[in-house]
Image (tube, rainbow, N blue to C red):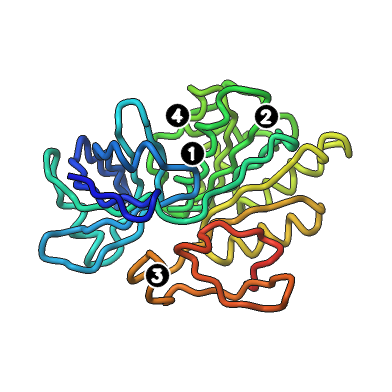
Amino acid sequence: MGAESRNTLMVEDARVLSHDAFPGDQFVMRVQSPKIAALAKPGSFVHIRCSDSLEMRRPLSIMRSNANTGWVDLLYKATGFGTQQLSQRQVGDNLSMIGPIGTPFTLNPERPRALLIGGGVGIPPMVFIASEMQSGDWKPLAILGSEVPFPFTAEPSRTLVPGMPDGVIACMPLLEQWGIPSRLTSLQGYPGCHEGYVTDLANTWLETLNDEQRAEVAIYACGPHPMLKAVAQLAQTWSLPCQVSLEEFMACAVGGCAGCTVEIVTDSGSAMKRVCVDGPVFNAATVVF
């Protein structure tokens, strides 16, 4: 039974609809959570109670949601005790969730050539953005990187992406089904993937655009801090607007404890902002990495 907190923050008992395991201790969980699904936006996340015996919740990015049928997809990696407990949950189990939390991405239709850059567990928000760009005049390209096997079975893309190096053809099948081009990167030698970082491949693609095409580009990114720092530098090099979703450890996730603060440059000087509610999405140019 859900209870409303503030006007857009819900506390809801979510029922597990499916729970699929992938190599690298990665899991994709679909939960029935109609109130959260109705309000979720790209970049928002949930704070989930992983086990009845574990009071401390864990923040997980929302990968997809369906407001009509009320489900939410979550991709996570079981790296600690909490997420390991979560990985044991079965179809039919109920999980307490708070969400959707945080400041989401702001999509800019004046720059329809969206460059979506996701690394590791930073992939989910990029999938969510892509789902919002299936219609209209959007021309997105997703570049996704991972140093463990991807949480999906990569396939050769049937979509030509001008500017991609020869042999870089691996894609995310879900995005391919949506008609959204994607390319994969890794240092692990996975077939069809670019051998390098996401920013390397993004820079290669940007170099092939003319000035008019680059004027249509905006960057959206989520991933580990070193990757986001490199993305911010890339955006600065090409004078492109860039939004990044930061990853931080969180306790309360609703702004009360201030345990997830980061330094942000504001008009009035440097300030400490809470990733959970002031973010997780920030203008990359304002983040002190």
For the residues bearing labels 4 and 1, Cβ distance under 8 angstroms: yes
User: For residue 251, what is the image quadrant?
Assistant: bottom left
Residue 201 or 18: which is nearer the viewer? 18
Residue indicated by mark 4: 174
Q: What residue type is labelled 1?
A: Val
Mark 2 and mark 4: span between their CA atoms?
A: 16 Å
Q: Tell me: residue 203, above or below residue 252.
A: above
* Left or right of 4 in this view: 196: right
Question: Hey, what amino acid is under mark 3?
Answer: Phe
Residue matched to label 1: 127
**Along the line of sight, which residue is nearer the eye, 179 or 279?**
279
To which residue does mark 3 refer? Answer: 249
Identity, as a three-letter code, of the amino acid under mark 4? Leu
Give residue 279's position: percent from left, percent from top.
Answer: 52, 61
| Percent position of residue 133, x then y | 57, 30
Residue 139 disc label = 2
| Callout 2 amino acid | Lys
Alpha carbon separation for disc pair 3 and 2: 33 Å
Q: At numbered mark 4, what does the secondary structure look like: helix, strand or loop?
A: helix
Work out whether residue 207 or residue 44 is closer to the camera in this orientation and state it. Answer: 44
